[in-house]
Image (tube, rainbow, N blue to C red):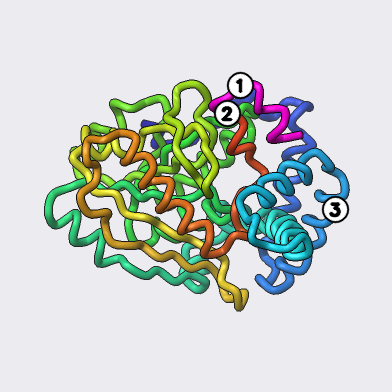
Amino acid sequence: MITEAQFERRLLAPKFWLTWLGVGLLRLLVKLPLTTQITLGQRFGRLFKALQPKRVQTVRRNIERCYPELSATEQQQLLDNNFDEIGMALFDTGNAWFWSDKRIQQHMQIEGQEHITQVQAEGQGVILLAAHCLMLEPGARVFGQAFSGIGVYRPNKNPLIEYLQTQGRLQSNKGLIKKTEVRQMVKALRQGEIIWYTQDQDAGGRGIFTNFFGIECSTAPGAPALAKMGKAKVLPFFVERSADASGYRIAIQPPLDNFPTGDDHADVQRGNDETEKLVRMRPEQYMWLHRRFKTRPDTNDRSEFYR
């Protein structure tokens, strides 16, 4: 488990100077009021949308398939709102990494803490089942003010970004475990720890095909497997930027009853169903940029899905 961000001298090399410049600018910008950040973030999001047509196509395709009940105009509005949120998420990430604990506490709201307290009182570990929403970074920082947990993550290929995100995430949490380190996750859960987990990204050939928004997709069976091996409870976890721009809100839901059942397909499907409910709470704040449905049951279907 990673408990400290390790700085290396190679991160000062010229190839990283532009990134350092951007980070320095972000540290200055997050001093602005949230309302100002939101205005600037929307502009960044619209610029990103104009410069990234392939990303726009991915988002459009995901929304078309996941929300077929919306009209073309409503789907376009959701797409536009999503790119506004993507731009704002840049500031949200900066807030999570660089705000003081005092400022975080001034802009946070946490509901459902009693569910975690109850599970821990029973001597069990906690798996927070979250969706890949754009608010995950501030969500982790806010949550850590009440309960210090452990994040399950995929290391960033850029060593400087990896250093910065590790440093930022460890400000109010105990540690980070790579997604491949299953034994460490199980050990932590058996010790009564809290672990963040998501299952809503494409799992490739190692996943189980279940439905997400009514679409067959490859899903990692990690949540039920970890719950069983770690003797832990799974609690759906929702985080959003408040609609009134006052800050960030977390809602911790009660633990899933009778989970896992031992039926891998049914358990993974239930995890998808719970994740879908989370996404539907604030769909404009979901990470539609991800090619969730890239791996198809029929290998000839891939080019058609993301045409």
Q: Are marks 1 and 2 in contact (CB under 8 Å)?
A: yes
Query: Bounds of the magenta span?
Result: 295-307
Please provide percent x and percent y for residue 228. 22, 36
Please provide percent x and percent y for residue 270. 36, 47
Dot 3 crowding, Cα within 10 Å, few <14, some 14–19, many 20+:
some
Please provide percent x and percent y for residue 80. 77, 60
User: How many numbered marks does the figure carry?
Assistant: 3
**Where does the C terminus fall, quadrant-wise?**
top right
**Where does the N terminus fall, quadrant-wise?**
top left
Q: What residue sits 75% from the left and 52% below the top?
A: 25
Q: Which residue is mark 2?
A: 296
Q: Is residue 150 magenta?
A: no
Image quadrant in which you'd find residue 143 = bottom left
Q: Which residue is mark 3?
A: 47
Q: Is residue 276 left or right of residue 18?
A: left
Front disc: 1 or 3: 1
Disc sitting over residue 179 in the figure = none
Dot 3 or dot 2, earlier in sequence: 3
Please provide percent x and percent y for residue 102. 48, 68
Residue 281 higher or lower than 89, as above or below? below
- 213 or 182, nearer to the observer: 213
Q: Are marks 1 and 3 in contact (CB under 8 Å)?
A: no
Q: Is residue 296 left or right of residue 85?
A: left
Question: Spatial distance from mark 1 to mark 2, Cα to Cα?
Answer: 6 Å
Dot 1 or dot 3, earlier in sequence: 3
Q: Which residue is mark 1?
A: 299
Amino acid type, callout 3: Leu
Amino acid type, callout 2: Arg
